Image: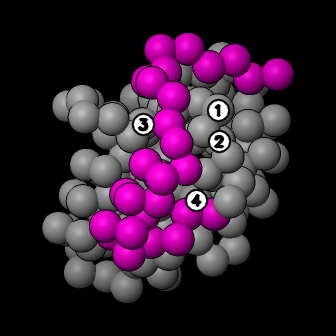
Amino acid sequence: MVEFFNTENNLTVEQIRLIASKYQLVFPDEYVDHLLINNGGQCHPNVFEFIENGQLTESNVDWFLAIYDGRYDSLEQYIKVFKKDQARIPDSFIPIAHDPGGNLICISCVDKKIYYWDHEKEMINADHNGAGNIHFIARNLETFLNSLR
């Protein structure tokens, strides 16, 4: 079972809805539930795997993003930078965490799947929906959390 620590203060559904509404997003229910229980923070275990170019690759979750007024690991700041200001991740993605190298773990608002977004392989001015820097991790958030080792 995954244990979370260094989390931020508990949230209300209204606080989550305000962020989603501000950026015209619909957070998957599973992610809303997760934020209500664990608002950001670190977790143990934290290693996950995905397939990249036919090879099994691994990384680890450094921090889950939180809704709070802080400077670091703020969900709102990541949405603002990666989605609105720079449009670097697909429209349907919400960043939910990052690894130590600054790559993102995202949830899709469309299919609720979890994806790894590799900034080092980012294609500038590419159609992000087909970019070679996005890799499937898990079919949903619960499966992702249960697969951490």
Q: Which residues are magenta?
A: 1-28
Q: CA distance from mark 4 to mark 1?
A: 17 Å
Q: Which residue is mark 1?
A: 37
Amino acid at dot 2: His
Q: Is 147 left, or right, of 73 in this rendering?
A: right
Q: CA distance from mark 1 to mark 2?
A: 5 Å
Q: Which residue is mark 4?
A: 107
Q: Residue 118, how many percent across, how many down?
A: 42, 53
3 magenta-colored: yes
Q: CA distance from mark 4 to mark 2?
A: 12 Å
Q: Is 36 left, or right, of 111 in this rendering?
A: left
Amino acid at dot 4: Ile
Numbered label attached to residue 66: 3
Of the numbered discs 4 and 1, the one sitting upstream in the chain is 1
Q: Residue 144, how many percent across, how many down?
A: 73, 44
Amino acid at dot 3: Ala
For discs 4 and 3, the disc positioned in front in the rendered view: 3
Pointers 4 and 3 in contact (C-beta within 8 Å):
no
Amino acid at dot 1: Ile
Of the numbered discs 3 and 1, the one sitting upstream in the chain is 1
